[in-house]
Amino acid sequence: MKPTLLYAMRILSSALPAFCLHLRIKKENMSEALKSLNFIEHIVEEDLRNGFPKEKLRFRFPPEPNGYLHIGHASSICLNFGLGLRYGAPVNLRFDDTNPAKEEQEYVDAIKEDVEWLGYEWDTECFASDYFQQLYDWAIDLIKVGKAYVDSQTSEEIAEQKGTPTEAGTPSPFRNRSVEENLQLFQGMKEGKFKEGEHVLRAKVDMASSNMLMRDPIMYRILYRAHHRTNTDWCIYPMYDWTHGESDYIEQVSHSLCTLEFAMHRELYDWFLDQVVDKDLVRPKQREFARRNFSHTVVSKRKLLQLVDQGFVKGWDDPRMPTISGLRRRGYTPESIRNFADIIGIAKRDNVVDVSLLEFHVREHLNKIAPRVMGVLNPLKVVLTNYPEGEEEWLEAENNPEDEAAGYRQLPFSRELYIEQEDFKEEANRKFFRLKLGGEVRLKNGYIIKADSCTKDTDGNIIEVQCTYDPKSKSGSGTEESLRKVKGTLHWVSAKHALSAEVRLYDRLFTDETPDAHKDKNFLDFINPDSLQIISAFVEPSLADAKIGDRFQFQRMGYFNLDPDSKSEKLVFNRTVGLRDTWAKIQEKN
């Protein structure tokens, strides 16, 4: 074999794995057997090979009901429920409701709606508050065996005596209280005999541990707030680290999947389990995956709440928000979000995912399912001077060329029409394939027209274009004139039949790719002042029958959906995404 040919074959061979990966990304419907496992699935598979019974697999999604879920949570939802589907295992929806100061029933309801909308069903709806009594009883047991104590220091004193990552902590002066005194004080905490902050219950672990989380972590604090489920039954509330693993154990969760910031918590998770676990029951295993951050947005619940409270957006479901409810209101589909989560997968390191990838997936899905309609967002009147006055006709238009079953609809056509202002110029070069004086274009599903003259207002703005139409050029008629080729095709609406609509054009909420990554600037400094533009438009009359949430492709303009603010007398459409990634072009130009 010739050396050059051998070399070429080696290059091709080395490129084959990358090519196969590319195919996997582009062909999302590839056979499940050919899809590679992520590292979490490898962990599960290894456990099964080592004898863990498949019928005892159980997963959970454990949100804290202190805000609305965002696109980062969607990845976690898809991971946990996806594992359930892959292995035929139940998945619990468990609310980590241990902080009544921030949690509300509104958030519980919103989270349930989001999970259901994404297309998943949970096996059991659980709350950490379901286990308050069991957690309390276990805490009593730890006190009795000398592994927990009541500390009467202030929070500042506790923080100071914890030491540093390189220096051991100093034991609390209350660390060696007697079991009897600890039981009495803890009972008093439960009965509301002390002020907030006067006492806490701490686990007695290791003040010299290199992991500062193991230096006698707090298990309970006093908090006089009504809980959304237990009301005022309790005035002591368990901390996350004490609650989380024990809740997993109570529910017999086999694999507890957390984001990377909880990696250091795993040692404490296991220590707490060691105190209560029964060797005959499933012992949960915590494993961590990387949090997904997204460009041109923030996913911190605290910062999202700031945006809502300070009026930068109109609520948690504002279509500019990265919340699942915001994406739903903007017109995203659950399929597109699931496909997006599948493609980005899970990783062991934090990274930033370009939001354009999410937009690509909704654009790709809507292209398959969204009916085509015509809407003019920046209207310019066109008068067909040779079309009979007072007459009208109905043209046949295909609803979706991607879906043969979508059928056809009837479009009204008349003497006066609207086209986009941008689609006409008095004079233009040869690369302008839209309408210009002396030039011809085809009206989508209609006729070929020629611009003869135009009218301007006193400021020189064009307000009307006078055209003539070729009555023999009707699309689909089969005439010689209808087969004549012209370079431009425009969308339009009949002025007589058009419906007025408010159209909300949404763009990135932040101008910076990582708005919360600047130490010297506030993330709010990067708010995009043009993230929302509200315009008046005209749409074809078939949209009078649209239902809230219905999605459409406005031909040549993008994908839109009917907003809940719509009324029969005033339609309101949100732009979900454009037909192309115009933001990338703007960034490239800059």
Image (tube, helix red, strand yellow):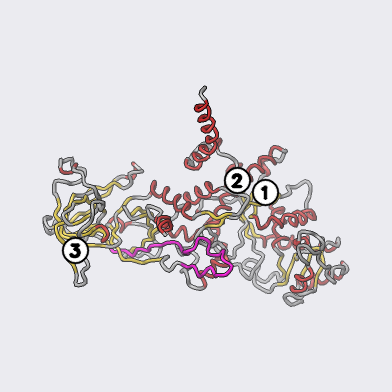
Residue 222: numbered disc: none
Q: Are marks 2 and 1 in contact (CB under 8 Å)?
A: yes
Q: Is residue 494 magenta?
A: no
x and y, in percent, of residue 122 in the image: 58, 51
* Mark 1 or mark 3, earlier in chain: 1
Nearest to the observer: residue 24 or residue 28: 24
Q: Is residue 504 magenta?
A: yes
* Mark 3 or mark 2, earlier in chain: 2
Name the residue that disc number 3 marks. 464
Q: Which quarter of the picture shows residue 131? A: bottom right
Nearest to the observer: residue 220 or residue 375: 375
- The correct choice, above or below, for 478 with respect to 497 in the image is above
Name the residue that disc number 2 marks. 83
User: Label 2 sits on what residue type?
Assistant: Leu
Name the residue that disc number 1 marks. 255
Instruction: Look at the image and tell me whether residue 9 can be seen.
Output: yes
User: Label 3 sits on what residue type?
Assistant: Glu
- In the rendered image, the residue lying farthest to the front is 3
Mark 3: secondary structure: strand
x and y, in percent, of residue 265 in the image: 71, 57
Q: Are marks 1 and 3 in contact (CB under 8 Å)?
A: no
Mark 2: secondary structure: helix
- The correct choice, above or below, for 110 with respect to 196 in the image is above
Span of residues in magenta = 500-527
How far is the residue under mark 3 from the one under mark 2?
A: 59 Å
How far is the residue under mark 1 from the one under mark 3?
A: 66 Å
**Image quarter (top left, top right, bottom left or bottom right) of the C terminus:** bottom left
